[in-house]
Amino acid sequence: MAQRAVWLISHEPGTPLRGTVRFSRRYPTVEKRARVFNRASYVPIPEDGPFLKALLFELRLLDDDKDFVESRDSCSRINKTSIYGLLVGGEELWPVVAFLKNDMIYACVPLVEQTLSPRPPLISVSGVSQGFELLYGIQDFLYSGQKNDNELNTKLSQLPDLLLQACPFGTVLDANLQNSLDNTNFASVTQPQKQPAWKPGTYKGKPQVSISITEKVKSMQYDKQGVADTWQVVGTVTCKCDLEGIMPNVTISLSLPTNGSPLQDILVHPCVTSLDSAILTSSSIDAMDDSAFSGPYKFPFTPPLESFNLCYYTSQVPVPPILGFYQMKEEEVQLRITINLKLHESVKNNFEFCEAHIPFFNRGPITHLEYKTSFGQLEVFREKSLLIWIIVD
């Protein structure tokens, strides 16, 4: 029950385009869900220009569409509802909820949580009724007490902020936009700051912010021609803020190194107040391309007193830093293990420490150990179920 996109289009007869897009909003997270639900029948949301032309044609609002058109005007296409299918780029975008009122066209595309071929009955698409509710709510907001074009333009400029509350991530919470406007105006009134319940004390002293970035490389190397090796970087940004004040505002900006891979799958701490939508929608399941968001990554937040994990992320790196080979042979009551590790030529050997952990699950304790290493030493962990190869200490 969500909306993929919303448009407000002014109908302007006598102008070259016969209309102008006054407002549009797309929801990338809902679009990803549509791609999954619709599968092969998925049709992407077009840009404003092609959508405007296709919608005006379907509504018979163009001067050059007065002639009979089979795909639109045949008896099999008699439309008794305000729901249309638009031909855009050779594909049909359906369902499009649209109606004309006071020379303004209100339109949206609800999410259909199933395949579109064959076309499901409208009564099974719950997003259609919510789409009507949202569009009529926008209409009531725009024209309640509206006296001139200046007031209309003012209300149109307020729509982006109001839809963040009334329809976050495409889900309609409150179609009465006046309620959202009242809440916004009330929140804008300056109130004295109160000590939040989750922050029992305040810091007194020299202000400082400490940041630590920890990255782990998860790698699976098979040493087989038919099986591709996989690896991924998993990172954590830990933060400790010693700042005076009840609710200090802090913004941390992370920038990638030269030729660094974009961050993906970003999860943030609840204290983060806002984020660029491009940061939230970058996912490792999508194919990497040049359009991927590459920063800077800005995190505005109000920090708690204690140390906390500001965010987690993943990243695709071109090569794993360490290449490894592992082989194990079992002979009655003993195991023979061969391990070869090689530092990739692009990685500098500047390690403060380097260890290789070889666990033995469900095999009982290690009772005897004989080993030969080309570098470092081998130790048995105190639980007797883990070997630690200390390479650099």
Image (tube, grey):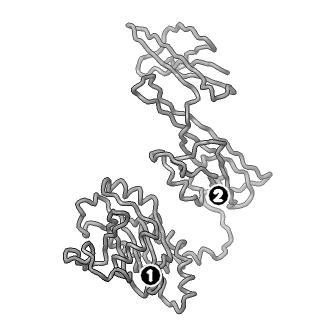
Q: Residue at x 55, y 32 (%)?
A: 319
* 2 or 1: mark nearer the eye: 1
Local secondary structure at mark 1 = loop
Instruction: Give the quarter of the image for residue 101.
Output: bottom left
Q: Residue at x 77, y 54 (%)?
A: 204
Q: Quadrant of the C terminus?
A: top right
- The residue under label 2 is which amino acid type? Thr
Residue in view at x 45 percent, y 87 percent: 14
Q: Identify the residue shown where x is 69% and y is 27%.
A: 350
Q: CA distance from mark 2 to mark 1?
A: 48 Å
Judged from the image, the secondary structure of the residue bearing numbered disc 2 is loop
The residue identified by callout 1 is: 18
Say left or right for 291 vs 122.
right
Up-down relation of residue 28 to residue 64 (above or below): above
Q: Amino acid at mark 1?
A: Arg
**Residue situated in front as seen by the camera: 259 or 389:** 259
Circle number at residue 75: none
> Residue 242's spot in the image, x, y percent?
73, 51
Q: Earlier in the sequence, mark 2 or mark 1?
A: 1
In the displayed structure, 336 sits above or below 319; it is: above
Nearer to the camera, 163 or 86: 86
Query: Is 242 displayed left or right of 101 in the figure?
Result: right
Residue 352 is at least partly visible in this image: no
Q: In the figure, residue 355 lies in which quadrant? A: top right
Instruction: Characterize the local packing of mark 2: few (<14), some (14-19) or many (20 or more) Cα atoms within 10 angstroms.
Output: some
- Name the foreground residue: 335 vs 289: 289
| Residue 337 is at least partly visible in this image | yes
The numbered dot on residue 302 is 2
Residue 156: % across, % down: 53, 79
